[in-house]
Image: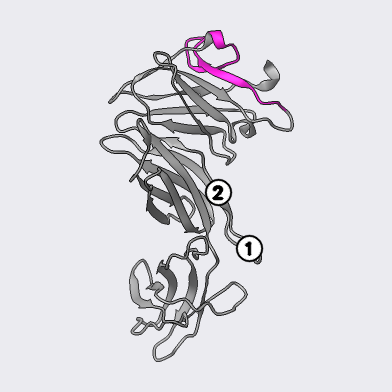
Amino acid sequence: MQLASPDGAPIRLADVELAAIGVDVVVGNATTDDDGTATFTGIPAPDTVTVTTRQLPPHGADTYAPGLRAGIAVRGGSTVAVTVPLVIGATVQGGVVGPDGPAAGRLMYAWNEDTSQVFRTTSDGAGEYRFVGLSTGLYRIEAYANGLASPAVWKTRVYQQRGTLPASQVTLSRHYAHSDYDLLVFATSGTSSAQLSGARVTVTDLATGASSSTRFSTVLDSEQTAQFQIPSGQYVVELRTAATSATPARTLWLGRPAGGYRYVTDRAQAVPVRVVFGGFNGWGGAVPDAAAR
């Protein structure tokens, strides 16, 4: 087996851990040599296996993304020569902050929702994190705080290297990580998911005036969520929608003008939501149609 670029050129990369997978079971393991080659022996036959990377050596922004070759037919007494294609993976970076400043040492996960691959890292002393070598797909990024808190969660989509084009380099905004309390804000739109794509959500503590902001995912979705890890208290939720080709950006507030929560255009109709440790801290509602203003 030979590691190779998508155009077939050999990739001489040592210490790549590989697995051969049969029907839901690993049937062989191997590690590449200095030439980027490896040999599996004793594969049960006949069988059809998939060869996939288990571990890829880090090389900064040039770290390769996980690769695989599926549908390899194995027959008794025969040797099969195959290549496993690799491309430079994408990078996602950003930062997390806590009640006292940068959140150092936070456990970070990047979950590929398309393939279920999981990448792990830890925020540094400045609260900064960096995932490298990510394969293409929609990712759920999680930053774990201490104690019983739910993780800060946000999403992004990354794209792999395509020929001579570099992989996507995605920078996410800083997210707040608190050790005890969290608030989930959601918004739904029946007419235009585009206005929620990348919309900014701000929550303001009525007692202190302190504010925290984040953005919804830029992936088009009729329902978006944002999670804040903040102290308990009463918060006003402000939503600034994204401008589209048909509608300008709007500033809305979460209110309850007719008994149920929904976003309103009048700041005077905003109704604070309560955040309390151990209680229900999920609040949100529908976004009014821009044409109905």
Give amino acid for label 1.
Arg
Name which residue lies at 49% across and 64% down: 63
Residue stretch in magenta: 247-268
**Left of 243 or right of it: where is 258?**
left
Q: What's the mark number on residue 72?
A: none
* Residue 33 appearing in the image: yes
In the rendered image, which residue does mark 1 sit on? Answer: 162
| Residue 251 vs residue 169, the one in the foreground | 169
Name which residue lies at 60% across and 15% down: 265
Name which residue lies at 44% across and 89% down: 79
In reply to whether residue 253 is colored magenta, the answer given is: yes
In the rendered image, which residue does mark 2 sit on? Answer: 170
| In front: label 2 or label 1 | 2
Q: Is mark 1 on a helix, strand or loop?
A: loop
Q: In the rendered view, tell whether residue 256 sits above or below residue 279.
A: above
In reply to whether residue 109 is colored magenta, the answer given is: no
